[in-house]
Structures are given as C-alpha cells and as structure tokens.
Amino acid sequence: GQQVMQIPQYQHVQEGEDFTTYCNSSTTLSNIQWYKQRPGGHPVFLIQLVKSGEVKKQKRLTFQFGEAKKNSSLHITATQTTDVGTYFCAGQDFNKFYFGSGTKLNVKP
Amino acid sequence: EAQVTQNPRYLITVTGKKLTVTCSQNMNHEYMSWYRQDPGLGLRQIYYSMNVEVTDKGDVPEGYKVSRKEKRNFPLILESPSPNQTSLYFCASSLSQRGGSYNEQFFGPGTRLTVL
C-alpha cells in the first residue's frame, strides 16, 4: 500500500546550524503538506506544495516538491530554539492523507 | 474563533466498553478526518469524510466507526475498545478545492485514550 517514509527520525543541532528533513512516497502524490508539532501540542500547518518541482520559502524555511511528485524536503537555515518540535510531511493520494513518521528536531542553545 | 474541538481530552476506559469521541468544527469545512498518533509511526488516518453522509476508510479503520450527519460534527466511535487502541487521537478539518485537492488541515487539540 501507499507509504510515506520520512528521515531522519531525530536530529540534534546546535543553534545556528541548518536542518533538513526528507520525505519519500511510494506513489505519485496530488500534493504534499508540511506540519509542525510542538511537544504536547497538535500539528500546525506550515505549507502546501502542489506543482511538480515547486519550491517555496517562508523566512528561514525552504520547502521543495520533487519533479515526480514523490519526494519532498524541508530545510531550515540557521536554526533557532523556537524551531524545536516534530516536523511531519503529509502526502495526499486521492482523498486520503499519508503522514511521514516525523523528524524530531532538538536545538541546543 | 475558527477552531476544531474534541471531547473528551483524556479518557481511560476498559476493554469492551463502547465510547464516542466527539469532534466539531466551526469553519464550514467539507473534509473531516480522524487520525491516531503512535510513537514512531506518525499520524495514521482512520476515517475521513468528504461531506455530509460521505465517509470512507483511511489506512487503519479496523475497530472504529464514524458518522457525518451534520457538516460540523464528525464523531469517532469505538464499539468495543481494545488495548491496542490506546493512542492519541486527532480530528482535523479542511476546505475542499476544485480538482479534488484539500487545503490545510486544522487539527483539534487531541484526545488521549487509554484502554485497560
């Protein structure tokens, strides 16, 4: 069945270092969404990518959607302690959503 | 305030005792969904609904039921809960776009369920 794999599972960085998480789907997706979940909280939407090869930026965050619409990445430049949390990708395939297992980011001040 | 509400937030129950977790949204969203979140597995979709009276199975529907009689409400029913349904449950809602896509999902605060 459909799967969305996400790596790495954990990432520990020093404040100011960069961070990247990757998602890979077994099938072509309609679109991909990215969410951030703080400890004890619920997932909060960051962005949606729809087009093949799309790149979107939000301040220090850069999101990419692969040409084949099967992979995506989130890159954070110069991490801050406020970036701490778990980042999830969610791929839409027809009317269903498939979440990656998440990357937990810890930032040391 | 635009929001998704879930009740209860915490529930401890015993095997076999039927329970319902309610979910309500005030954004007039067509699409609603239930997820369970388990460590290391991310969020897995249980059931979703594209509109009133239209529901379908997600990735892990076994042991769950849903209904969508009104647009704003999407309750999750566990007819005979078992310990492997101990999890953190999230309800989410989203606006539909033309062409079968959905906008951002708004998540409720979560319901932590323990089945003994």
Image (spheres, coloured by chain):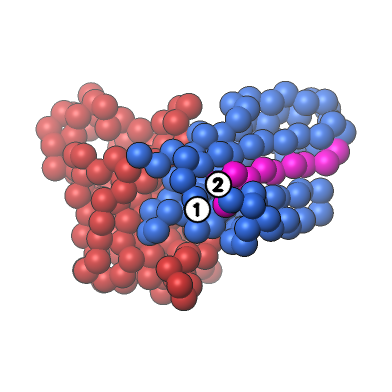
Chain colours: A blue, B red
* Image-quadrant location for residue B24: bottom left
Q: Which SS class for mark 2? A: loop
Q: Residue at x 14, y 42 (%)?
A: B79
* Left or right, residue B64 beside residue B104: left
Chain letter behind tag 1:
A
State the mark number for residue A29.
1
**A76 inside magenta stretch:** yes
Q: Residue at x 35, y 50 (%)?
A: B34
Location of residue B85 in the rendering, given as x and y in whole percent from the top left corner: 27, 32
* Image-quadrant location for residue A109: top right
Cβ atoms under marks 2 and 1 closer than 8 Å: yes
Instruction: Name the one closer to the observer, A23 or B46.
Output: A23
Mark 1 Cα-neighbour bin, 10 Å: few <14, some 14–19, many ≥20: many
Number of marks drawn: 2
According to the picture, the residue beneath numbered tag 2 turns out to be A70
Residues shaded magenta: A69-78
